[in-house]
Amino acid sequence: MSERTEALYKSMGHAFGTIMFGAIGGFIGYVITPWVGGLLGSFVALTYIFMTVQGQLS
């Protein structure tokens, strides 16, 4: 597999993960309050992005 294809798959995986976390956060927000859910969803998404970036650097 070429590096370009691998990078494409990785970025697709990151996008999918971010969307999934956003959906979970949105669902929580719908159940509790939009403010709490939005805050939680953003936090989880940022944490996920930070973790993936850390994984790439190490």
Image: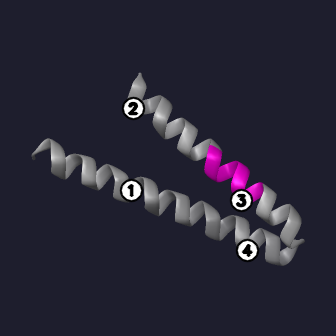
CA separation in Å, label 2 and label 3: 23 Å
Magenta-tinted stretch: 40-46
Q: Which residue is mark 4?
A: 27
Q: Which residue is mark 1?
A: 13
Instruction: Please state which of the two labelled residues, at mark 3 or mark 4, is closer to the viewer.
Output: 3
Residue displayed at 89% across by 71% down: 32
Q: Earlier in the sequence, mark 3 or mark 4?
A: 4
Q: Which residue is mark 2?
A: 56
Could you say where residue 51 lies in the image, as x and y percent from the top left? Answer: 54, 37
Q: Are marks 1 and 4 in contact (CB under 8 Å)?
A: no
Disc 4, SS:
helix
Could you say where residue 55 lies in the image, as x and y percent from the top left? Answer: 44, 31
Residue 36 located left or right of residue 24 = right
Residue displayed at 81% across by 77% down: 30
Q: Earlier in the sequence, mark 1 or mark 4?
A: 1
Instruction: Please state which of the two labelled residues, at mark 2 or mark 4, is closer to the viewer.
Output: 2
CA separation in Å, label 1 and label 4: 21 Å
Residue displayed at 50% across by 58% down: 17
Residue displayed at 84% across by 76% down: 31
**How busy is the neighbourhood of tag 1: few (under 14 within 10 Å), some, or many (20 plus)?**
few
CA separation in Å, label 1 and label 3: 18 Å
